[in-house]
Every structure is written in C-alpha cells, then in structure tokens.
Amino acid sequence: MCGICGELRLDGQLPELKYLNSMMAKLEKRGPDHAGSFSDGGLMFGHRRLAIIDLSYKSSQPMVDIESGLALVFNGTIYNHPELRAELKARGHHFFSEGDTEVILKAYAEWGEDAPKHLLGMFAFAIWDMRKKRLFVARDRMGIKPLYYAADGKSFRFASNTQALLTTQGIDTSLDPLAIHNLFSLHAVVPAPRTVLNGIRKLQPAHSLTIHANGRQELKRYWNLVARRPAEARSEQEWIDAVHESLKTAVRRRNNIADVPVGVLLSGGLDSSLLVGLLAEIGIKDIRTFTIGFDDQPEEKGSEYEYSDAVVERFRPTHHKFHIPNEQTLSRLPEAVANMAEPMFGQDAIGFYLLSEQVSKHVKVVQSGQGADEVFGGYFWYPQAHADKNPDMLQRLAPYYFDRDHSEMAEMLQTPFQTRDYTGELVRELLESPDAQETLDAVLRADVTTFIVDDPVKRVDNMTMAWGLEARVPFLDHELVELAAQMPTELKLRDGGKYVLKQIARGLVPDSVIDRPKGYFPVPALKFVRGEFLEMMRALLDSQACRERGLYQRSYIDKVLASPETHLTRIQGSKLWHMAALEMWLQSLYD
C-alpha cells in the first residue's frame, strides 16, 4: 500500500524533478516508510512506500527489472502473489525479492497487457517498458485503489490523488458541469473517467491504459461482472455454503498476506461483526478490533457501542474504543475534507478519518466491511426498485436513489453549470447494459462496479491512507462478488436484505447484531445541521470565494439555510452539507 506518481513527456522534453518532488510530498501520508524515484529519458516515476509485505529494501520502489527491461510503481496488495510466483518461476522467471511488487513485473513480462487478469487483489500500478518506450497503467477490478491522471498532449501525469497532480503546472481546474450533475445526483459519486475538475481524470476500474511514445492511447477493459443465474441451479443451502466458503477465503487472504499485524474496523453492524466471527472461525487468535463513536443528537445516536460491545464480549479480541465529541468533529472536519482526493458527502468520512488516526497508532492494516450491502442487497432502496413495475428501468431506481431530480439542479445551479440530464443518461446506460438477468441484478451490478467505487470505497481508502493505514475489503473480493452476482434475488432481499450473510452469521455472532435494525456509520451532527455546524456551513456558502465561483443560486442556498433539517435527500443526507462540502473541498485545494 503506497502512493505513486509519475510523468511521461510526449513532446521530447524531459520531466522536471521539482514536480516529481512536489507530487511525492503530497503522497507522503500514504507511504511514510520510504521514498524512491526513477527516470529514463522522458519518463519519471515517484513512490512513497507503506511497508506491509516483504519489509526489506528488496521490495522498495520504483522497482526496476533489468532482465525484462521494465520499471514499476505500484499501490495495493496482490493476495495471490505466492501462487503467481510459483507459476512464473515454473515459466523460467527469476526473483530477487519476496513481495508482491516483483510478481507484477514478472507477470507483465510474461503476459503483457493481460497481466491484470492474473492478479487477485487491489491495485493501481504503472509499468514503463524501457525498450519499447511505452507506459502501461492498470487499476483493479473493483476500483479499490485510485489512479488519477492529467493529459494535455504534451505529457501524461498520474498520481494516487488529485492534490499531487495539482502541484504541477498547466492543469485545468475549472469545474466540469457534467461531473457536478453526477456529484449532486449520486451523493458525491462521479463515475470514472470524470472528476469535478476538467483537467483531471481517473482510470476506470477493471481497465488498463497504454500510452505510446507518440501520445497514442489504448484503453482496454479486462474484466466484466456477469449478473445472471448459473446453468446449474443450486439449493438455498448450497448458496449459503458457497458464499460462506468464498467469504472465509476472502477474509483469510486479507489476514494472512501481510508481514505485519492486521486489525478489524468494528462498527457494530452485521458486516464488520461477521468479519470478526469469520477470523475466529478460521482459527485466528490475535484479533484486534477498533470502534469509534460520536455525540448523540436527540434524533439519532452517535455510536453503536451496544452492538460492538456484544461482539467484543463474544470473541474477546484486543479491543480499542474511541469517542469523539462534537467540538472535535467540527474542528477536524476541514482537515478530513482536505485529505479527500475528490469531494465526498458521506457523513461517515470524518468518522473514518478520526478512527484511522487512532488505529494507525496500533496497526498498519485493517479489514473493513465496505461492500457487503451493495453485493448482498442490504440497502432499503433495493426492494423498492425491485418492486417498482415501471417499464423504464431508470425510473425503477431514480425515485428511491437519486439525491435530487434533474429539475432541482436548475433551481440549485447557476446557468453555466446547468446541463442536460447527464446522470440519467449515464445510469440508464449502466442499467441497460448486457449480462444482467433482472432489474435488481442490473441495479446491484451498477452499484458494485460504479457507484460504490466513488462513494464508500474511495472514502475508506482516502481516510485510512491519510494516516498510513491500509484498509482491506473482503466483501469486494472479486471472486466473491462474481459468486454473489449469480445468486437469486430472493436470497438477497429476504429478511430485510443480506439474507445469506445473516444465515452465515447465525450462531456465530450475537443475535442482537443480526436482528438489529439496519444502521449506518452515525455522525448525527452532519445530518441534523445546527449550532456551530450550521454557522460553519453558512460561512462557507456566504464566503467571497463561493460567491465568485458562481456555482450555486443564492435563492436556493437561502432556502436550504432557512430550514436545513428539512432538506434531506432520499437516503437521508443533508443537502446543506453537500453544498458546503464541495465548497470546503475546493477551498482546501489552494490553502
């Protein structure tokens, strides 16, 4: 797990070292253990390392393999690297390190652009072919690891976050109206390749991109999720058993492939509690768990301690519990936002940021429960979309999921930022693409492969890596995801959702956790905006910078400020916080 960056000049000039240094400085938190660089003519790589696997200098990066003429920078973890190493050795490759980094190099030397198909894990990497003068970049199937880039015809620059790219010159920082439409429709999701900044794009999950010396680019998709029933029918118990075994494998991989201790972020919900239970089931003795809570509001509790405490009582892990008062939540909020590669609206971002700060004092790696709801049908809008009989597939989802209708965008945004219903077009294309058997299959596939990437997955990566903490997400093991995508709808929606996971958990984790109402990582102060939080958001939206940006209509801001607690999205997010969060993020870019 690391931070990567680089530049390929396409105009015959040499990259400037000062920009590599400035990008690496912005990536230091992602990789505090080691810094390295590499250059070859018009190509320059930078790397910040968080040492997790093969802690020796032999796995430091950038890694250069003279035998194959390849150089690599890599962010992530390859869980099947021992098996791949054995296969590649049998094919005649020689290794000088024990980590997963070199396995990627040899895999590319063996299989070329098909190398990502052989990798099981989370990754973003760049490989420079010193002989062919060709750059190859790739991102994992589920988009767990980020890869941002800026291409202007003269150069191709890439980095693990936007802040690193913005330390260089010539990047267009104007706002992309189509991305803004995504942002405010899909609770901060801007699907790749767009970002809110016109000059910065991101590589799509499950894609690779080859950049030739003449500037020609070749984008290639190497994986697609098929959401259709298998040829041979399975009984309910067979599905439960298959998912149970696949999930145990995913948890085992993410615990055992590390040369440092691995903890668990324990929220008190079913998903993270099940991870603890499965670790115990596969025989892990030294389980370390971490829980955070916030101040209550009259309408909502700020912690789930009663549930996480029951899990701790059952399994007796080494447990750490942290409580964050509202005054600290408010004072640290701008700091958390400044560490976001893109603006995020999820109220739990500050929670993950402050939890990661504490957890990083104890471990370097944690498992986290993100993805279970999207993969196994846990959110309330899934049965709503499933039950809707509208012949228009988009309209089966949008009324329950979109934060704002297209008409509200015209009320909120000033004329230069008003567009066609771009989000509706994009989501319709996702839902109507082939290889989904039912409406719910299409909805879940869109969520798993697109929406989740730029909401909870990105949020957890950004907030943990801000403290040099690696988060691993077993529910997004692509083999588990492929299995779940074939599962009958009823096994996902029964019993309020996630039926199969509840059956696996029954008898393993406390019933109180399984049978509790569906909860979310609570940070009530960002949902029920009042007091100092309201004044902070008012100041942001009334600031000279916000007014000069010309994004929001003042009449809309005034309406929401007059009654912020009544202006909530369909999934109960604060519309006031959404506007303020984007403005806070934009202002943080230039502090």
Image (spheres, rainbow, N blue to C red):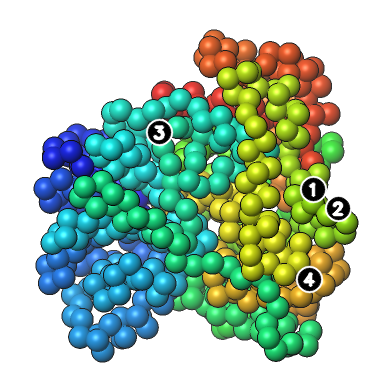
| Quadrant into which the N terminus falls | bottom left
Mark positioned earlier in the residue sequence (1 or 2): 2
Q: Nearer the viewer, mark 2 or mark 4?
A: 2
Q: Residues within 10 Å of mark 4 (few under 14, many from 20)?
A: many
Q: Which comes before the other along the chain, label 4 or label 3? A: 3
Secondary structure beneath label 1: helix
Q: Which residue is mark 1?
A: 395
Please determine whether, in this image, residue 85 is positioned above or below residue 384: below
Q: Which quarter of the figure has residue 134?
A: bottom left
Q: Report how far apart the C-alphas of labels 1 and 2 lie in the structure.
A: 7 Å
Image location (x, y in percent) of residue 532:
68, 22
Residue appearing at x 67%, y 16% in the figure = 553
Pick whichever of labels 4 and 1 is earlier in the sequence. Answer: 1
**The quarter of the displayed image where residue 555 is located:** top right
Real-space Cα separation, disc 3 to disc 2, in angstroms: 39 Å
Residue where numbered disc 2 is placed? 390
The reply to whether the C-beta atoms of the residues labelled 4 and 1 are less than 8 Å apart is: no
| Viewport quadrant of the C terminus | top left
Residue tagged 4: 489
